[in-house]
Every structure is written in C-alpha cells, then in structure tokens.
Image: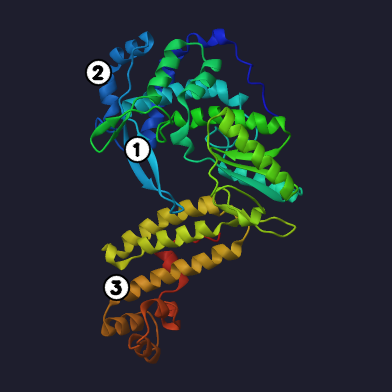
Amino acid sequence: MAANPETESPSACDRLMEEVCERENLKQALKRVKANKGAPGVDGMTVQALPVYLREHWPTIRSMMLEGTYKPQPVRRVEIPKPDGGGVRKLGIPCALDRFIQQAVLQVLQKRWDPTFSDSSYGFRPGRSAHQAVAKAQSYIQSGYRWVVDLDLEKFFDRVSHDILMSRVAKRVSDRRVLKLIRSFLTAGVLENGLVGATDEGTPQGGPLSPLLSNLMLDDLDRELERRGLRFVRYADDCNVYVRSERAGQRVMAGLKAFLTGRLKLKVNESKSAVARPHTRKFLGFTFSGQVQAKRRIASTAQTRFKERIRELTQRTRGVSVDQMIGALNRYLTGWRGYFGFCETPSVLQRLDEWVRRRIRCFFWKQWRRGSTRFRELLARGVDRNLAAQTAGSPHNAWRLSNSPAMQRALTNRFLRSLGLPSLNV
C-alpha cells in the first residue's frame, strides 16, 4: 500500500530553509559529501578543500541562503560510456560547495517526502536496494505474472520538464526560498568545451538532489500504476510491470505511453522497451530463468561487461606488477561479488571464477616471455622436467597454454588465493 502524499501540513514547510541551515544537518551533509568524494566542479575546488573554505565563507553563504539570493555555479559536463555500450551518459558535476548545499536540502526534504512514496519504488531511497527490487520482481513472476512490460524512458534525466517538476515540488514545499534554490540548481547551466550553456530541461545526473527529484517526478507514474491495480517494480527510471498475458501487456504498454507523454512530457524509448517473457529481458543486471521456479540469473550483458573489465585488468601491457594487478582485481571482484552474488546460479559464478584464474595464468605465462624462463619457472613450481620442457617449447598460444596441466600445477588455485585473489563462488 502507498502512503498518503497529503500527510504534511504546508505551514511546517515555511521555515524549511532554517532547517536546511541547522548546524546538525550541515555537519551530516559535509560528512556525506566528503565520504562520496567525487571530482571537482567548474571552480576546481576539491572535497578535501571544502571544510577550510566553509570555515571562512559560511556566514556569508548562510545569509544568502536565508535571504533566498544564493546562486549555484554551472555544472561541469562529463560524458561516461554507458555500461551496455549504448552511447554515453552525460553527468553534470556540481562544484563541491553546491554538492554540500544540495545534500543539506536533500536530507531535509527526503525525511518529509520519502514516507509518501510508493512501496514499489526502490531506487535511491533510504533502506531500499536494487536487490529488494529484483526479489520483488521475482516474486511476481513466481505468482504467475509471467509477462513483463519493460519500460525504458528515453534520456529521462535530460528530458525532465522543469515546470512540471517544480509544480510537483511546490505542492509539497511552501518556503519560497527553497523553491527558488531548487529551480536555480535545475537552471544553473552546463560548462561544456569551455562554454556555459543554458539548461531549460533535465535534472543533471551527478548532484545529490537529482535522484530525489526524479523519484518525485515519477511518483505520478507510480500512482497511476497503483490506480490501475498493476504489479510493478520501479528503480529510478527503470520500470517493470508484471501481467498474466501478452495481450494485457500490450494494453498496459499503450496506456502508459499515452500517460507518460501526455501527463509528464516524457518519451518511451521504443527500441529498449518491450512486452516480453521475463527470461528474455534484463532488470538491474539480472534476468530470471524461464522454468516454474523463476531463479535469479546474471544477465548475459553483465557477464560480458565483467569479462571485458577483467581483460583490461589482466593485460600484461598495462605495465603493472603482479601485486598491483591482484590488488585491482581484488577490489573489482569483491564489489562485483557483493552485487551479483545475489544470483541463484552458483555454476555461473564457478565458471567465471575458473575463467578469471585462467586469465591470471595467461598473464604469468606472457610475463615469463622466453622459453628458457618458462621452463625454469615451471620447474621451480613443482612441474616435472618432461612436462615443463614440453609446455615451454609448445607452439600453442598463451590463452590455450594457460589451461594446460603444467600451468594448473605451477599456479594452483591455492597459490592464487595466497596472492589475495578472492573467489566469486562463496
């Protein structure tokens, strides 16, 4: 069940800016911004330099905020490749001071707004996670809702209408200074190739306030789905609706497209949206097996990305030592396992584990380079003379030899663990 969005009295919001500027709230915001690290914005100030700057300038900034005259700086545009290889994602990096102020505003608004959001919304909310969203989707499939309406909003963060978004904010906030500040964050402009361009739509991905504003904007979509009695899971702009038949799915898709374009001026990405069986689609890096028991599986695109990253980290031409390579692998594998270890297919993790070990054996083989060095290294690692000579003189390529009995004996799984290589299959 969704909470009632009308639970807050507007009078409580009139002194919101004072609440934003409270010492305890600011201390918490500074702590969070420092923990998130992040690159400098247009002014080049690092997060580490922020506390010193605030000690000197905060009284002036505070009075500007309380008077409603604070003006944020433009955001610095950075393009990062999308994980699925489908173009680039544009991030807007606010300067450290603006990130701090956004964080302070976020903390005050989130406390008020979050309890009113839908139970089916999981993205960027305290106490909620992608794993919970995936498990909820799985429970719908298990209950017989074996068709999914997979909605992808085209360039959602770049296309949000400021007027529609601000009208939603104004329904919940009556402090004009806070409304003005939020709008000024939206319209601060973007520095790209040395020129500042205006921003008349979109909420820049990269600022602390952006996820909360996107949840507020898409709260209308959640309400509409609830009004229609549909089973859905939304994580930021990634929304899946689960239905019992393909016909029902097509009907829902048509209705939602009309609602999103008409009410929210948002566009559905036709090429990435579909009505399909859940096992043919991916959701937050996972997919589901098509059997009666819908098990969580790692999407093939996520496995491909994983292998690409491991290839990069184990390239001999990177010019790093074995210790540095294992250190980088350790960090990446631990994080990856923390997320994808949630799958229910241990055999996939086992296969990937074997593949990673093979990449490392290949790295060693290439590092030994000459036949004489290879022969000496294999002997020193307990491989008998004949097998060592045969392998060292083999015409086969490094990848094939990385799986040879000699290399498996020379660089055992136990030895690789002793170097600090974590296992995915725990």
Residue 420 seen from this side: no
Mark 3 or mark 1: whose residue is earlier in sequence: 1
Residue 324 seen from this side: yes
Instruction: Name the quadrant of the N terminus.
Output: top right
Q: Residues within 10 Å of mark 3 (few under 14, many from 20)?
A: some
Q: Amino acid at mark 1?
A: Gly
Q: Amino acid at mark 3?
A: Gln
User: Circle 1 — which element?
Assistant: loop
Q: Position of residue 235 (x, y in %)?
A: 56, 39
Instruction: Name the quadrant of the C terminus.
Output: bottom right
Task: Estimate the spatial distance between the alpha carbons at disc 3 and disc 1, rounded to whole Å.
Answer: 35 Å
Task: Estimate the spatial distance between the alpha carbons at disc 2 and disc 1, rounded to whole Å.
Answer: 22 Å
Q: Amino acid at mark 2?
A: Glu
Q: Position of residue 236 (x, y in %)?
A: 54, 37
- Depth check, mark 3 against mark 1: the one in front is 1
The residue closer to the viewer here, 281 or 164, is 164
Q: What numbered label is drawn on residue 38?
A: 1
Residue bearing the label numbered 2: 56
Q: Are marks 3 and 2 in contact (CB under 8 Å)?
A: no
Left or right: 2 with respect to 79? right
Q: What numbered label is drawn on residue 367?
A: 3
